[in-house]
Image: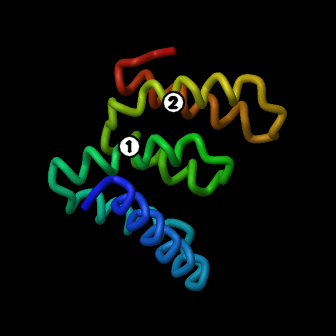
Amino acid sequence: MNFREFRQEMESYRRSVDEEARTLKDSYLALDKLHALYEKFDSEERAMADRVLAEWALSDDEGLRFDALALIDDFKVKTAAHTLRTLASRLATSIAPGAPYELQKVDRILNDLGSPI
């Protein structure tokens, strides 16, 4: 499977589990299932998943960013550090009400990855 196909599969899976979580009114179900999926990946699949998570981290969709940041943090995805710095810069100038809090989260993740801003 090439990266484009892998990305589509991950996006499709996330949409599916996100819809299931909404239907069941269980806000963490999707994240739990994404964790389980990531844990099943072999090293090649993890490398592709890490690229997808980095893309998701820059999404305008707050829910998608939330999931990406949680997975990047939990699985210590060091390859996402550059993307997280880009996101931090964007959040630093954002007027969105949640931006300061999300920026704190991104800063913490970067520090945990050993890649402070």
User: Crowding at label 1, few (<14), some or many (≥20) Cα neighbours within 10 Å?
Assistant: some
Asked whether 105 or 12 is in front, the reply is 12
Counting residues from the N terminus, which is met first, the one under dot 1 or under dot 2? 1
Q: Is residue 24 left or right of residue 35?
A: right
The CA span between labels 1 and 2 is 12 Å
Q: Quickly name the residue at label 2.
A: 84
Q: Quadrant of the N terminus?
A: bottom left
Q: Position of residue 55 (x, y in %)?
A: 50, 44
Q: Residue at x 38, y 63 (%)?
A: 34
Vertically, is 103 above or below 47? above
- In the rendered image, the residue lying farthest to the bottom is 23
Residue 111, relative to residue 5: is it above or below? above
Q: Quadrant of residue 112?
A: top left
What SS does tag 2 mark?
helix
Report the amino acid beneath label 2.
Leu
Residue at x 33%, y 30% (from the top left corner)? 78
Q: Residues within 10 Å of mark 2 (few under 14, many from 20)?
A: many
Residue 51: give its label.
1
- The residue located at (38%, 67%) in the rendering is 9
Measured as percent of width and height from the top left, residue 61 is found at 66, 53
Q: Amino acid at mark 1?
A: Arg
For image coordinates 60% across by 31% down, the residue present is: 87
Query: Regarding mark 1 in the picture, which secondary structure is present there?
Result: helix
Residue 60 position in % (x across, y down): 68, 48
